[in-house]
DNA sequence: CACCAAACGGAGTCGGACTCACCTTAGGGA
DNA sequence: TCCCTAAGGTGAGTCCGACTCCGTTTGGTG
């Protein structure tokens, strides 16, 4: 049940090459074609499709790795800052990450917009990481409670799906507004917790 | 310079039919094919392409009309409620509008994500409408100042680009958080105004 | 080193958006 | 009323990208 077969050496190498090529391609050009990615990886399209069912599956895998990296951030930030500072830092980190890799925004967007099982793990992991951050803050009375990581994650989707000019300043402002909204123990409530 | 030629009667009729067919098609099925839209309108694809350069141009026009409708809302709400209540009502109205027409979310997303001149008018109009709302609120001391309609609009993009299950409750919560963040005269600031 | 299942290559299929050469018709003028 | 003509309509065909399929190659095992 764990792994039926260990994957042949050349296959593993090609898989790696494809992921790397895809990452590069997506960073350079948002809608890179499968042929182009395969070429970069030095394989034929058939090989690409042996490893990834569809173009989207490849995209998903690349972004899953990216997201996993981001998921480690909240715990690290909590170790270094107060919970509310950690929250703010995380929001801004996310904006920065989006700036570095334009592809990232699309990833979050997809993660949010689909029910695809491909993204479920990433979503869950990220939500858990954020839950930790929010719960710690709420326990300290610094952040409003009753807000789940999943909800905040969706708010972030809006930040990262923007690619028009001047988006980055706007993203920082939105992150700040969200942060203030979360920190502020609101007079208004939004119904039962999600 | 106003209009070079007045457009023949049958052409105008077909144009209307296409827009109507497209609206229906997009409401029913997010990625309706051009053939399908043409069929619904009772014309051939060639006719569709005589009126709209690309599929996207057609989408843009349909959504431009939708957006124009939403743009009228802030002024109306201000006439009936206090500025902060009007703001909250508008945010929730937007969520509701998204619920009714799934296509709407994609529209806002596109409006935000592209620099396409197609959407410039809609964006500007909407931003102006929101500016009015925000400025009125700020003047009354009910809403933080220094926030432009454009910025809030981008925050809304996040609300409306969500289509996963349970999105609507989450959208309402995010709208509320944004609202609280905007109303709250923040201790923190987000740099100079955008 | 012989074998064979796993992996690879790449021409071919398929499904969309879009085009273009020809046909149809609204509507203005004689 | 009936041409005449340019605006408008048609739909088979092109193009282009994701994806498939089967003949060929190769890692790794006895």
Image (tube, coloured by chain):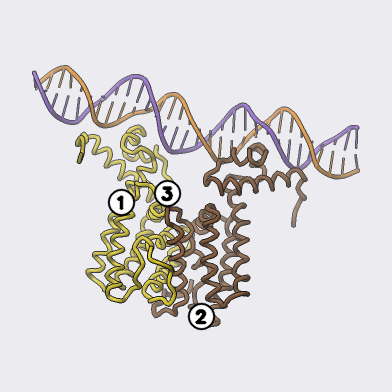
Chain colours: A brown, B yellow, C purple, D orange
Q: Is residue A106 visible?
A: yes
Q: Position of residue A81 (x, y in %)?
A: 58, 75
Residue nearer the viewer, A189 or C9? C9
Is B122 on the left-hand or right-hand side of A81?
A: left
Q: Which mark is residue B121?
A: 1
Q: Rate crowding at label 2 as few (under 14), some (14 to 19) or many (20 or more) other CA atoms within 10 Å.
A: some
Residue nearer the viewer, A164 or B70? A164
Q: Secondary structure at mark 1?
A: helix
Query: Between tags 3 and 1, which lies in front?
Result: 1
Snapshot quadrant of residue D24: top right
Q: Which residue is mark 2?
A: A142
Residue nearer the viewer, A112 or B193? B193
Q: Secondary structure at mark 3?
A: loop
Is B67 on the left-hand or right-hand side of A94?
A: left
Measure the C-alpha gap from mark 3 to mark 1. 24 Å
Q: Rate crowding at label 1 as few (under 14), some (14 to 19) or many (20 or more) other CA atoms within 10 Å.
A: few
Q: Which mark is residue B30?
A: 3
Q: Position of residue B111 (x, y in %)?
A: 38, 53
Q: Secondary structure at mark 2?
A: loop
Query: What residue is drawn where x is 34% and y is 46%?
Result: B118
Measure the C-alpha gap from mark 1 to mark 2. 41 Å
């Amino acid at each position: 049940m764990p792994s039926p077969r260990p994957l042949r050496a050349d296959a593993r190498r090609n898989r790696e090459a494809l992921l790397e090529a895809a990452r590069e391609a997506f960073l350079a050009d948002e809608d890179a074609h499968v042929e182009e990615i395969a070429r970069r990886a030095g394989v034929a399209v058939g090989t690409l499709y042996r490893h990834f069912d569809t173009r989207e599956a490849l995209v998903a895998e690349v972004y899953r790795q990216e997201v996993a990296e981001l998921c480690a951030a909240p715990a690290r930030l909590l170790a270094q800052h107060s919970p509310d500072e950690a929250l703010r830092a995380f929001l801004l980190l996310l904006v920065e990450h989006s700036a570095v890799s334009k592809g990232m925004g699309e990833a979050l967007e997809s993660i949010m917009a689909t029910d695809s099982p491909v993204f479920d793990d990433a979503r869950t992991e990220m939500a858990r990481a954020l839950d930790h951050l929010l719960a710690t803050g709420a326990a300290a009375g610094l952040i409003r409670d009753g807000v789940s990581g999943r909800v905040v994650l969706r708010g972030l989707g809006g930040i990262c799906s923007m690619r028009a000019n001047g988006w980055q300043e706007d993203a920082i402002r939105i992150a700040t507004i969200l942060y203030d909204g979360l920190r502020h123990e609101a007079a208004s409530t939004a119904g039962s917790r999600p």
